[in-house]
Image (cartoon, rainbow, N blue to C red):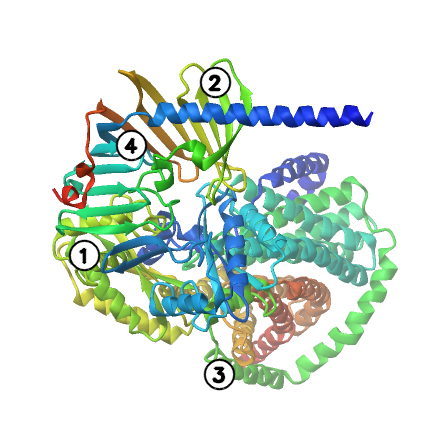
Amino acid sequence: MIRIIFSTLILSASIFAANAQEANAILQKMDEIMFSAKDISATQKIILIDKNGNEEVREATMLQKGTDMRMFRFTSPASQAGISVLSLPDDIMYLYLPAFGKERRIASSSKNQNFAGTDFSYDDLESKSFAAKYTAKLLKTESNAFILELIPKTPSDYSKIIINVNKTNYYPEKMEYYDKGNNKIKEATYNFKKLGKYWNTELVEMINFKKNHKTQMIMSDVKYDTGLTDDEFTVRKLKQ
Amino acid sequence: MEKLAERIVKFRWVIIAFVLGLTLFLGYQLKNLHINADILSSLPENDPTALLYKNIGKQYGGNNIGMIVLETENVYETEVLKHIKQITDSLSIDSDVSSVTSMTNILDIKSSEWGIEIGKLIDEYNLPEGQAELDNLRNYIDSKDMYKESIVSADGTASLILFKLLHDADMRLAALRIKNRVNNLALPETLYFGGLPFLLTDITELIVSDMSVLIPVVFLIIALILLVSFRSLRGMFLPLLIAGITVIWTLGFMAILKFEISIISNTMPVALLAIGSAYTIHVLNSINLFSLKDRKKALLKALAYTIVPIILASLTTSIGFISFIFGAYLSIIRDFGIITSIGIVFALLLSIFFVPALLSGLSFYNKKDKKANKEKKDIITHGFLQPLIKILFKYPKRVLAIWLIIIAFSIVGVFMIKTSVNITEYFKADNPTRISENIMQKKFGGSLPVFVEFEGDIQEPEVLKMMIKTEEFIKQDPNIHSAQSVADLVEQMNYAMGEGEKIPDDKTKIEQLWFLLDGQDIMEQLVSYNLDKGIIQSKFASIETDEIDNFTNKMNKFIEENPGENYKINFTGIPPLYVKLNDSLVKSQYSSLIIAIILVFLIVAIIMRSLSEGVFATIPIIATVLFLLGFMGFTGIPLDIATVLVGSVAMGIGIDYSIHLITGYNTHMKEFGDTEKAIKETIMAKGNAIIINVLSVAAGFLVLVLSHIVPLKNFGLLIAISMVSSGLGALTLLPVILILAYRKKNNNKTV
């Protein structure tokens, strides 16, 4: 009897372990799809939509090398044209405001703040591997998607994120963000499209349920692996 | 009149069926009746200050802001910070809360030579520990105007947690749930809950508990008085039934017309129970009076005898309430006037049609009334009315002199009347809302919001500079401790960019600094979405009328002296609204009194077809109102949103006694042709009903003394006093005037 219970325990524990293993494998595959390009250059259109349906459009060019070097340069509206944000490894960020002609280092001690009026927090925009930040659990397998539950490894505003990962191509289709009271507070939906050998995030839409506010990020003119060098990601470049 | 009375008896079953049907229908409507405890929502739409205040509350979400104060010996302890974080977290996961601001999550912009740090005042995942870190935090907070006295009290013993509810949230349910949630954390510190969501919840609860306690008590007390007075179940049952149906009809009608129960109309059922029972008392009294053998005949005669005075009485009482429609600043006062006067008309219709119908239909005639009535009459008649008549005829001048002395004293008192508009004073001293408000006042420089709104392009340097100038100006007032606007944030950002703590002259610079502020929670509390409006938020610490007046005048002068092409400045807030409310209380007190006096005089004069009788009937009631106001002056009971009603209500109800007396006098004059005899007969015949009526109405209103809301307590007490005084006025002052007028006329004739 005891043996049966014991073996059931081991069995369920191993199912559990298998589940975790499988879930983490799926997450790693997703990371590969999302962050495999050596570098990207693209144009970003950011559309902010408030609860009354008012839209505000911003445009920027974006350069990214690896997962931790990124240059974001706003081109419109005119009042914000030239504002640039440079992100470097170890959470170092510089901001350049052309009207002042100076750069300032920005430390954002809290990554849960929203980036420039969007519904994305600095945390959401970080191109850091999901597998490194979260522990995954496979909730269920649907006909075209794996449903994963991600639990943050470090302190976060989120209690969990539920991700739908495409079963054939392993890109995320939807991410649901939950607060510590287990309320769904945000939801991101993704449109991926294959460009050459990479899957590109053509559109991400983030909805903030509490603010009733939406942000769409649309990427175009995407070029992969053009051989960007570290020189593109310096304070000197920021000011140009 | 007899014809009408006959018809009523003829169609009795139709009337009974109709009343029953309507009662069922209107009773069913009660489920749609809502309570609205928000006094501010009752501010007039046509007053620019009030309108601006309401709009700012809506636009910048200030009406949805709740506050929790955590009080302890020293806020700067890791343990305490942990608890503040716990509260913050438990609020931010509430589905109705859109944002929370506390010590543990407030935005902080630090700048140094190397750059800017936009972050949080405290790292919530790594709270300061050890004396050194805690001291640092304290010094840092003390050095920043933004935090001092706004998030932590100056003495470091209290911390404020602000939260904003979603627009579509049910404020009351959310407030209750949040209170529960936070109390369930079982924190060792003392917590206080404030702000509109909690205030309204508390008032709503007070209204509900007031209504559910007061109405049954009023019922019981009036029942007891009726039983003792009439010594018959019919005498007790009928007036209460009529009053009860009146209340159901009126509340049902309110629901259909989408009126809401307010902190004022909350008293309406009590008022209607007291007033509504009175008409039936008079009908029953006159039926008793004409206790003929043929009961039907008695009923008909009694009806004919009372219909006119009852119609007159209800008309004048309605006028007392209707007089609030003119000149009332708050719509809750106006609505109360409208609704209660509708209720009075219901009571009138019921006692004229339904009471006789019921009496004849159900053979509900008094069976053993004769003997009982005689006995009871003997007590009031021998014990009070007969001696009274003797005194009145023996010493009419002395009685008049006593009244004149009382009136003279009262006039002195009228000049001592104070006003009270501070909503927190409307609660008893041990009420949690009042305690919270006091703490807010003591620790965080008051809780009376002050707003200065700027219209214009908020990113224009000129506008932002003017905002800073205005802030500096208002901070000079000793009652203003802090002020906040987007201009402060722009200055801080400019400093962080290394260009000093000032507004840049170049608009592009401002637009680019804005990039860093965009999307921060605080922005929507300070600027409009289109950036065409922005506000300075501040708090005023005093509720003294002259200090508020002084500040309001200073502000208006400042705005006048600082015009600009690119902006317009508007000033609002609770302090200037209190000034207006205060003015309006005094104004509407006098205007509604004057309107009521004139209308009452006109109606009595027209129906009696006699100017002098109009004057005679109004004199006792004017004396009563003066006595009442004088009483308020001497006892320090202030004029407030409820007591402002007393004068006109007292007048509307009190005039009834004079009307009953005068109509009786007229009837008996026709009968005997002799004034003295007519007066005697009238007092004997009507005195009874008047005394019962005074007692039941006064006792009914006196029950309001049990109310949790201070103005209502005072209101009940004052109405009770004025009932007694107007009853006495009708039974002493009025006869004395009639006697003296008659004697003078006689003397003139003999001369």
Give the CA separation, mark 3 to mark 1: 52 Å
| Figure quadrant of residue A190 | top left
Q: Chain of mark 3?
A: B
Q: Which one is in front in this view, the residue at disc 1 or the one at disc 4?
A: 4
Which x, y percent locates residue B459? 19, 51
Tell me which numbered mark, 4 or 2, is placed earlier along the sequence: 4
Q: Which one is in front in this view, the residue at disc 2 or the one at disc 1?
A: 2
Labels 4 and 3 positioned on one and the same chain: no
Q: Determine whether the residue tagged by mark 4 lies in a helix, strand or loop.
A: loop
Q: Which mark is residue B412?
A: 3
Q: Quadrant of the N terminus of chain A?
A: top right
Q: Which one is in front in this view, the residue at disc 3 or the one at disc 1?
A: 1
Residue A149 vs B617, above or below: the answer is above
Q: Nearer the viewer, residue B657 or B419?
A: B419
The residue that disc 1 covers is B463
Residue B193 falls left or right of residue B59: right
Give the CA separation, mark 1 to mark 4: 45 Å
Residues packed near mark 1 inside 10 Å, few (<14), some (14 to 19) or many (20 plus) = many
Are the residues tagged 3 and 1 within 8 Å (C-beta)?
no
The residue that disc 4 covers is A66
Q: Chain of mark 4?
A: A
Q: Residue at x 24, y 28 (%)?
A: A40
Residues packed near mark 3 inside 10 Å, few (<14), some (14 to 19) or many (20 plus) = some
The residue that disc 2 covers is A145
Q: Residue at x 18, y 45 (%)?
A: A235
Labels 4 and 2 positioned on one and the same chain: yes
Q: Nearer the viewer, residue A132 or B358?
A: A132
Hey, what amino acid is under mark 2? Answer: Ala
Hey, what amino acid is under mark 4? Answer: Gly
Which x, y percent locates residue B266? 58, 54
